[in-house]
Amino acid sequence: MPEKLEWDGIDDRCVHVVARNAAGAAIGTGRLLPDGHIGRMAVLKRWRGHGVGSALLRELLAAARERGFERVELSAQTHALDFYRRHGFEAYGGGYLEAGIPHRRMRLDLVKRQRS
């Protein structure tokens, strides 16, 4: 994504999670926005498939529950749809391009998931 699209001026109001390797280097990240959206999920390529993204997402969902959100939403790159589906997210609406990359909107009802 172009750097100018990465800066939105709300980082100081978001909850940030960072995964680190044994040496302390950042290997993944994500954030929870004040409106309950999850964004900026990213894991270094060589660390994908090792549970890093799942751990980040669990922390973000826990933060959303702590803040009383009943639902979280995100904008998923289409290649990551199955990852989010495995965590209970459902796609809705049509596809669209964001920064030239195909995306779909997804949501997860936290209240329903807690009761299950």
Image (cartoon, rainbow, N blue to C red):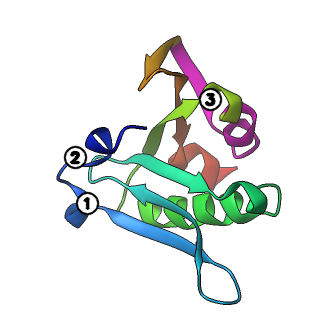
> Mark 3 = which residue?
90
Taking the spot 46% from the left edge, 61% from the top edge, the residue there is: 65
Residue type indicated by callout 2 = Asp
Q: Give the crowd class for mark 2: few <14, some 14-19, many >=20 residues within 10 Å.
A: few
Q: Is residue 26 left or right of residue 71?
A: right
Q: Look at the numbered disc 3 and give the secondary structure of its residue.
A: strand
Report helix, strand or loop for mark 1: helix
- Which disc is residue 8 wearing? 2
Q: Give the residue type that dot 3 points to.
A: Glu
How far is mark 3 from mark 1, CA to CA? 26 Å
State the residue in front, 88 or 43. 43
> Which residue occupies the extreme left position in the image?
9
- Residue at image coords 36%, 66%: 15
Residue drawn at point x = 77 percent, y = 60 percent: 46
Q: Which circle marks residue 11 in the picture?
A: 1
Magenta span: 81-93
Rendering coords of residue 69 (x, y %): 38, 52
